[in-house]
Image (spheres, helix red, strand yellow):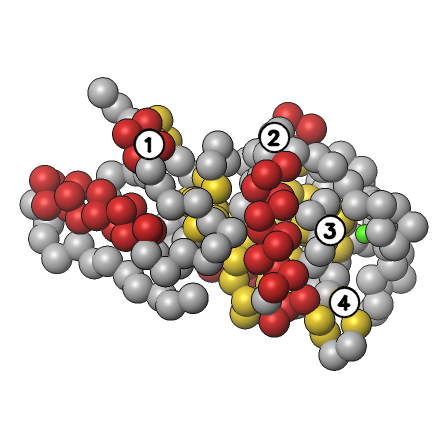
């Protein structure tokens, strides 16, 4: 997957809007096969004016524009990187989105750490404030996002499993497991992660 960014070369509002629009159209190129090109949804949804969407983001119908980052970061670092791209650590709104992203994860170099399956890729939810109460990075209860299916793997999730180096059980950050379902993992672990640029309703 190649990375191709569209830069706004003019500060003129109209040019900036057109540039932003073209960057969205640019998503039609170099898409991994799991991603849907923007089509009729272009008429219905557009990202915020002034935001250039990198063409290596992937549109998933009905959910949003996502990118699987294959570099490793802690949950906090990942959150910061997503923000720097004009987005946020991903919040999944459908099983379809989870399935598409899990397939991308399984096809990526992230899937194995040596000969062991990876622990997952970070998403934008956590239970840092209240153990067992999972919320998105926007404070929304996980069960209201449209997707909150936990993985049955590793004896069932969420398990708040032991994080090496810490005395208490402390898996407080959210991840997508290889099976397309959710897991709580260590916030200090270094994992791949999914960023999202939220779609907004086009103003008519
Ligand atoms: Ca867990």
**Judging from the image, what secondary structure is the residue with disc 3 in?**
loop
Q: Report the side of 18 relative to 97 (left or right).
A: left
Residue drawn at x 76%, y 67% is 117
Which residue was labeled with disc 2?
Answer: 145
Per the model, the C-alpha gap separating discs 2 and 1 is 24 Å
Q: Nearer the viewer, mark 2 or mark 1?
A: 1
Per the model, the C-alpha gap separating discs 1 and 4 is 38 Å
Which residue was labeled with disc 4?
Answer: 117
The residue carrying pointer 2 sits among few (fewer than 14), some (14 to 19) or many (20 or more) residues within 10 Å by Cα, namely some
Specify which label sits upstream in the sequence, 2 or 1. 1
Q: Report the side of 147 relative to 80 (left or right).
A: right
Can residue 79 be seen from the camera position used here? no
Between 40 and 176, the residue placed more toward the observer is: 40
In this view, 198 is above or below 55: above
Which residue was labeled with disc 1?
Answer: 40
Q: Report the side of 16 relative to 114 (left or right).
A: left
Residue drawn at x 28%, y 52% is 26
**Residue 191 pos. (x, y %):** 64, 64
């Amino acid at each position: 997957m190649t990375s191709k960014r569209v830069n706004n070369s003019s500060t003129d509002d109209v040019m900036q809007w057109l540039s932003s629009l073209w960057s969205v159209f640019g998503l039609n190129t170099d898409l991994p096969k799991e991603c849907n090109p923007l089509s009729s949804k272009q008429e219905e949804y557009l990202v915020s004016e002034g935001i250039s969407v990198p063409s290596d983001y992937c549109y998933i119908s009905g959910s949003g524009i996502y990118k699987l980052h294959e570099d490793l970061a802690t949950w906090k670092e990942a959150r910061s990187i997503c923000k720097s791209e004009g987005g946020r650590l991903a919040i999944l709104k459908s099983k379809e989105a989870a399935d598409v992203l899990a397939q991308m994860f399984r096809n990526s170099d992230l899937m194995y750490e040596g000969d062991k399956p990876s622990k997952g890729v970070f998403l934008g939810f956590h239970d840092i404030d209240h153990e067992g109460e999972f919320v998105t990075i926007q404070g929304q209860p996980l069960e209201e996002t449209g997707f909150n299916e936990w993985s049955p793997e590793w004896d069932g999730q969420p398990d708040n499993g032991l994080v090496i180096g810490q005395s208490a059980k402390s898996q407080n950050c959210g991840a997508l497991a290889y099976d397309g379902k959710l897991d709580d993992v260590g916030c200090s672990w270094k994992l791949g992660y999914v960023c999202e640029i939220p779609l907004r309703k086009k103003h008519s």
